[in-house]
Amino acid sequence: FLKSLNNREIASLIWLAVMIASFFPKLKGSLLDVARAILNPKLLAIFCGLAANVVVVVALLLRWSLWDLTLLKDTIAWYLMVGTVSVFASARRSEDNLPKALFIKAISLTFVAEYLFSTYVLSLWWELILVPIVALPVMMLALAKSQPEHRVLVRPLEILLGAIYMLLVVNMVLQAVHNLQNLAPLKAAQQVLLAPVLSIATIPFMIGLGLYAGYEELF
């Protein structure tokens, strides 16, 4: 599993470990509260249900030779970063527009960009430098948007992030052109389509969750 991580993911994990080690004494109480919330029986049952749904989809893809262990990292990443977020979004949305919203999100082209940005990365040392350079403006932008007195910083920060992303796109295109002969079309298609397939396959589960949340509010 660790061998499947690219330099950007390794750099992100290193910085995450540094942050946890630095702030753990101060955040210990908050982390324990989060752990208790996650271990709530209802929430735990929902996450287990989502995991079971993903396992069934993966089993079907494996049976049809459309999934292998090289996709394990992407499957886990989808569960943690997309699936769990969709759980909370489904509980908040009305049941009328939920199926449409989930489907539109599943077929959006953002998963193509995510695949390209995760495939064509820099060396580990450059990624270690890049992660805080990107993370800091992103956090500052979120803060500036949430506080009216700092709204003046929104535009400059957006321009800065746009310039950084443009440099990453240039690097991505150059690497893609350079490695065009080494591209495995089937493997690339599997990686690109995994996220939308998982998202579409879990729509019935999310609809059921939305209905359950609405029922809980009524009673």
Image (spheres, grey):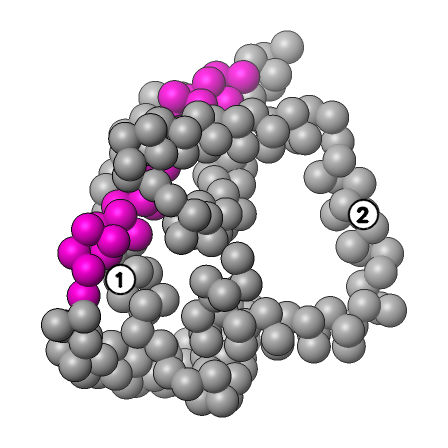
Q: Does residue 20 appear left or right of residue 106 in this picture?
A: right
Q: Quadrant of residue 147?
A: bottom right
Residue at point 80% right, 55% down? Answer: 30
**Where residue 63 appears, x then y in whole percent?**
33, 29
The stretch in magenta equals 183-212
Residue at point 68% right, 30% down? Answer: 44
**Where residue 91 appears, x then y in whole percent?**
52, 30
Identified by mark 2, the residue type is Asp
Residue at point 41% right, 76% down? Answer: 154
Q: Does residue 169 appear left or right of residue 23 in this picture?
A: left
Residue at point 59% right, 70% down? Answer: 13
**Where residue 178 appears, x then y in whole percent?**
16, 81
Q: Is residue 66 above or below residue 178?
A: above
**Residue 187 lies in the magenta-colored region:** yes
Q: Is residue 179 visible?
A: yes
Mark 1 against mark 2, which lies toward the viewer?
Answer: 1
Q: Is residue 208 above or below residue 132?
A: above
- Specify few, some or many for label 1: CA neighbours under 10 Å numbering under 14, 14-19, or 20 or more: few
* Mark 1, secondary structure of its residue: helix
- Along the line of sight, which residue is nearer the eye, 19 or 94? 19
Residue underneath mark 1: 113
Q: Quadrant of residue 122?
A: bottom left
Identified by mark 1, the residue type is Ala
* Mark 2, secondary structure of its residue: helix
The numbered dot on residue 33 is: 2
